[in-house]
Image (spheres, rainbow, N blue to C red):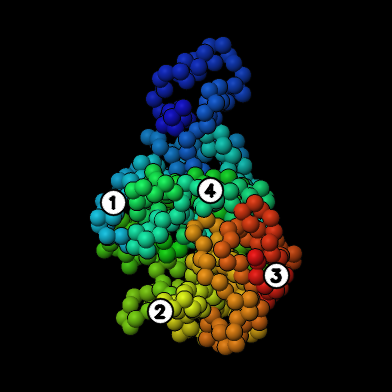
Amino acid sequence: MPSTTLATIHRRRAPRPAGALSAALSAARSAALSAAVLAALLAGCATVGQPPAFTSFVVLSEGGAAVARVLIDAPTCPDIVVDGQPRPMTLRAPAATLPLRPTASAPADSKPAAFPLLTCEAALPAGGHPRASVLGRALPQPVAAPRRIVVIGDTGCRLQKSSNSYQACNRAADYPFAAIAAAAAAWGPELVVHVGDYHYRENACPDGDAGCAGSPWGYGWDAWNADFFAPGAALLRAAPWIMARGNHENCQRGGQGYWRLLDPRPLAAGRDCNNAADDALGNYSAPYAVPIGQDTQLLVLDTANTTWKGFKPGEPGYDAYRTLYRRLDALARQAPRNIGIAHHPLLGMGADRRADGSVRLLPGDAGLQQAFGSLNPGLLPDSVQAMLSGHVHLWEQVSFAGGHPSQFISGFSGTAEDTVPLPEHLPDGVTPAPGARVEQFSSWVDGFGFMTMERQDADRWLVQVHDLQGRVRNSCQLDGKRSRCAVAQVR
């Protein structure tokens, strides 16, 4: 049954539907069938075995406010039913085909972004455990103090002409995000944290490449759905999410989709990435805090437009991220302990290979280090216990001897992996940031999976690394700011 029909029948003042459903409803009324049968018809055409065609999830916003989000091809937004009471959802963004704007791709390799569906939303009541559903589908319930958290990142399938990189999106072994999402959902999370980079299908698959043949591409809904919503469906239904923003969601890339589909805050005029003249607004946003109990907050940072090479004099990002740091510092003072979420790792290591074949170790994001370091030589507020990041396509843990927080990188959940090896132990003097003395280092290169965090008490977390079947490959203890893992290198 088309989702348009479902949305239409769900609205009390909408025109009466035609066809088989209308006849079934009339028969139900005339025969005085039970309310349960009628509800089944309304909830998704149970009699014909076709679930409603829409996407639903819950995303957490400032202060932990929960926002129900529904993406649906329909004339109007459906109602949401909260604790048995229906109420209308608000239209966040209408269906539209957005004019082509300058992107990271050449004009010949880009196209207008089409979003032929509504983005609808509704705030869920604070406190308690509200039960909410849309068109018969239950929404995940927010938990005030989640103790079981899944952390994933860099989940899209890379189709990128500029790097001549075309991942085999059609082969589950080469693009396993759907399997990872299912395994992570089976683990039973109370919260999911995505550290950014959802969208990677920027350019068309080359002719003759069976690995990605037929894949949607560009920055519209079809690519977003193939890259994130369809493969991530099981995990979207398992728990509420925190949606951090990565560089693949800046305005020159998937920013239009990020703002209309994922960001939890109200969609502000000019902050939709539709007009390149507004990019100074659309490429940056303020951090926000999500309390998770026991005097702890998650601090969510938008680092979509930083540069790992560092800012040149006069570049706007330097002042923008200095402003972000000041706001971050104010938020961090609200709680005695904080865990930061930023797509780009300030305190992690990467690697690439030089032309002669030798390996070069790469420190943390230089742009953020410049901006934050100009205000705090320690880079982060003292109450930050750990940082969760992605961007580097691997899993990594770094702990420090001084006052720096532990760094975890969970960028290994679908996108083509980094394969340049990292050393088991960092050489003397090698550090991700000036003044940061590495005490313990662990990594997994060239392996897909997800990370979990289980709270043990106020300051301690059990952090585990799972492969795409859900098997535990490494276990770490985070105690205060320091962390230690059982295995230095997962193989």
Which one is earlier in the sequence, the residue at label 1 or at label 4?
1
Q: Residue at x 61, y 19 (%)?
A: 34
C-beta proximity under 8 Å, tags 3 and 4: no
Count the marks: how many? 4
Amino acid type, residue under disc 2 in the picture = Gly
Amino acid type, residue under disc 4 in the picture = Ala
Look at mark 2 in the image and give the residue it sits on. 310
Which one is earlier in the sequence, the residue at label 1 or at label 2?
1
Q: Residues within 10 Å of mark 2 (few under 14, many from 20)?
A: some
Give the percent coordinates (x, y) of residue 236. 56, 48
Give the percent coordinates (x, y) of residue 129. 65, 47
Q: Residues within 10 Å of mark 1 (few under 14, many from 20)?
A: many
Label 3 to label 1, Cα distance in Å? 46 Å
Label 1 to label 4, Cα distance in Å? 27 Å
In the image, residue 3 sits, relative to residue 404, either above or below, namely above
Q: Residues within 10 Å of mark 4 (few under 14, many from 20)?
A: few
Query: In the image, which disc is placed on residue 172?
Result: 4
Which one is earlier in the sequence, the residue at label 3 or at label 4?
4
Front-most of residues 163 and 379: 163
Front-most of residues 411 and 358: 358
Query: Does dot 4 land on a helix, a strand or a loop?
Result: loop
Amino acid type, residue under disc 3 in the picture = Val
Query: Does dot 2 land on a helix, a strand or a loop?
Result: loop
Residue 218 visible in the shown view: no
